Image (tube, rainbow, N blue to C red):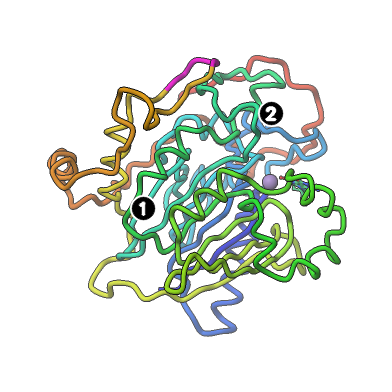
């Protein structure tokens, strides 16, 4: 199975699909799946643009809306995580993941999915220590603070992912795991990005929770984006277990933003999204740990009196499995929840200050 991996998309979906098409023709291959590592910018309309944390000059409709309103159809099954530039109001409609357009699936705050026997995990957002322990209380209309905290990684999602024990083929996050530069050619990286040096030395570069996840989950591949450069590393967990890490650039001409890998899949299984039973059971067992309050929300630990390990037993997985039919296939249940921009509307610069009236609209 050929999988294309994209660094930050920054709304350039049409360009990414065009690049893949050119590659397919040149190499005579067929790409089966596209994975995008955040900064996806699923802006359906003008209001969505204003929910994104970017300077005004970046308010640009780009091309996602065409796939949302049906003007175009995503030619490849596409899955993505969120980064720090997102239509966060839209992504908040799908905290556990879901279709943001036909054939384009958002993985939610954290997720494990199965595609023809290949197991893919991911976490959305970036790490900022000041929001890590807080519940998720962001609501539209966002203010300048919630517009940012809405995409900060929370401890619950890292805790949930740490309950996963069955092996993962691929894991994706937007920011890099902290310290990963020590396992590749860091001299070359610093030549290209000299201003990373101070942040590396002071521990500011990269995400510590993502480093924990890399060490816990030990995926065969780990892909990331955010730092806008290509960087490869080999992380050895033990003699038998290693992770191939690759960070990719953003989508711009002449940038190294796309990588294709070929992974063996179950040829008798269809290339379609399936829920992962271990993950569904973890979600089910940890539902009570969700908080929507702005205060600190500690995860249970060995020193407490309540259950603190949620790696599911076979019996617990059976109980969850029995709630599902259709062999865990993710239903194709995309629904439009807002009016989409159309190409017929005149192109213009969205430079005015948005008034704080932004909210979910229903069509
Ligand atoms: P974004 O597209 O998410 O706004 O920002 C990505 C840009 O910020 C990239 O050019 C990346 O190199 C830079 N960047 C992101 N995080 C850090 C950091 O922790 N330290 C430094 N020095 N640059 C960063
Ligand atoms: Mn980013």
| Mark-to-mark CA distance, 1 and 2 | 31 Å
In reply to whether residue 97 is colored magenta, the answer given is no
Whether pointer 1 and pointer 2 mark residues with C-beta atoms closer than 8 Å, the reply is no
Quadrant of the rendered structure where residue 249 is? bottom right
State left or right for residue 179 relative to residue 292.
right
State left or right for residue 363 relative to residue 65.
left
The answer to which of marks 1 and 2 sits earlier in the sequence is 2
Residue at image coords 69%, 63%: 182
Q: Secondary structure at mark 2?
A: loop
Tag 2 residue = 50
- Eyeballing the image, is 348 above or below 327? above
State left or right for residue 339 relative to residue 12.
left
- Eyeballing the image, is 151 above or below 8? above
Residue at image coords 59%, 47%: 64
Residue nearest the viewer, comparing 267 with 135: 135
Residue at image coords 17%, 40%: 316
Residue at image coords 41%, 44%: 161
Q: Which residues are magenta?
A: 291-295
Tag 1 residue = 113
- Eyeballing the image, is 252 above or below 311? below
In reply to whether residue 293 is colored magenta, the answer given is yes
Where, quadrant-wise, is the C terminus in this rendering?
top left
User: Is the magenta region chiefly helix, strand or loop?
Assistant: loop
């Amino acid at each position: 199975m050929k999988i294309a991996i994209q660094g930050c998309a920054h709304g350039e979906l049409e360009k990414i699909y065009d690049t893949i098409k050119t590659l397919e023709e040149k190499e005579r291959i067929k790409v089966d799946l596209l994975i995008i590592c955040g900064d996806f910018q699923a802006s359906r309309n003008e209001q969505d643009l204003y929910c994104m944390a970017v300077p005004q000059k970046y308010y640009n409709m780009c091309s996602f809306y065409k796939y949302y309103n049906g003007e175009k159809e995503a030619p490849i099954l596409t899955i993505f995580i969120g980064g720090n530039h997102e239509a966060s109001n839209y992504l908040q409609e799908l905290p556990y993941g879901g279709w943001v357009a036909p054939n384009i699936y958002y993985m939610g705050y954290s997720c494990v999915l199965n595609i023809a026997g290949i197991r893919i995990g991911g976490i959305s957002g970036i790490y900022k220590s000041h929001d890590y322990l807080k519940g998720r209380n962001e609501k539209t209309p966002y203010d300048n603070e919630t517009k940012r905290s809405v995409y900060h990684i929370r401890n619950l999602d890292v805790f949930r992912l740490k309950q996963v024990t069955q092996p993962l083929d691929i894991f994706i996050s937007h920011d890099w795991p902290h310290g990963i530069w020590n396992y590749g050619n860091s001299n070359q990286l610093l030549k290209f990005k000299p201003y990373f040096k101070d942040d590396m030395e002071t521990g500011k570069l990269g995400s510590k929770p993502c480093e924990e996840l890399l060490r816990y989950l030990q995926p065969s591949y780990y892909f990331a984006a955010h730092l806008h450069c290509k960087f490869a590393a080999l992380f050895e967990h033990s003699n038998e277990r290693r992770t191939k890490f690759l960070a990719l650039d953003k989508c711009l001409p002449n940038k190294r933003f796309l990588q294709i890998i070929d992974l063996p899949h179950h040829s008798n299984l269809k290339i379609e999204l399936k829920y992962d039973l271990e993950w569904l059971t973890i979600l089910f067992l940890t539902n009570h740990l969700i908080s929507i309050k702005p205060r600190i929300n500690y995860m249970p630990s060995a020193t407490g009196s309540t259950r603190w390990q949620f790696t599911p037993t076979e019996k617990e997985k059976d109980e969850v499995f029995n709630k599902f039919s259709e062999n865990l296939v993710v239903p194709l249940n995309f629904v439009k929840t807002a009016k989409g921009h159309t190409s017929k509307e005149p192109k213009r610069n969205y430079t005015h200050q948005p008034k704080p009236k932004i909210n979910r609209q229903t069509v």
